[in-house]
Amino acid sequence: MFKHTNAFSGFSVDDLDRAKRFYGDTLGLDISENPAGLELLLGNGTRVFVYPKPNHEPATFTILNFMVENVEQAVDDLVASGVSFERYEGIDSDEKGITRGGDDGPTIAWFKDPAGNILSVLEQPA
């Protein structure tokens, strides 16, 4: 039924101006605004809708994964921009917060947006 329809993903934030600065300035994404919220314009042409919600509660799962060639460099760049990385109980990560999956999974590091939503940088396989 929906095989040939366009679709997009969306998530809420508690402060649209703060989200605009984070996604635009800190992460360097192209953003367009409309009366209902923001559209994040991702490198592959995908659009993600970000909308304000007064009773916003952060997602407890990863809402957006950014594929990068080098997670360590991405983490260093984000830390230099003031981003902190998450460490989760039961998941081994190094001093930078990078989980190096090897054969068991991806090389990945998680961080949060200003609204507390979880994002990640995920290394593309060679």
Image (cartoon, helix red, strand yellow):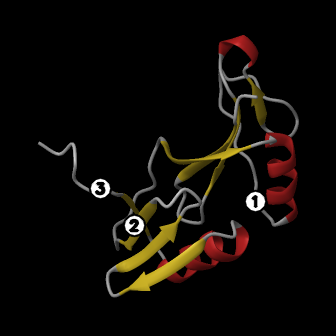
Q: Secondary structure at mark 2?
A: strand
| Label of residue 34 in the image | none
Q: Which residue, as the protein is rendered here, is positioned at the far top?
A: 103
Image quadrant where residue 26 sits: bottom right
Q: Secondary structure at mark 1?
A: loop
Residue 119 x/y as whole percent: 59, 49
Q: In this figure, which residue is indicated by the disc labeled 2?
A: 49
Q: Which residue is mark 3?
A: 7
Q: Name the amino acid, label 2.
A: Phe
Answer above or below: position of 9 versus 100: below
Residue extending farthest to the left is 1
Task: Identify the residue position indicated by label 1 in the image.
Answer: 83
State whether residue 70 is above or below residue 126: below
In the image, residue 95 lies at what x, y percent?
Answer: 88, 36
* Discs 3/2, front: 3
Asked where in the image residue 99 lies, by quadrant, the reply is top right
Residue 74 vs residue 45: left or right?
A: right
Q: CA distance from mark 1 to mark 3?
A: 30 Å
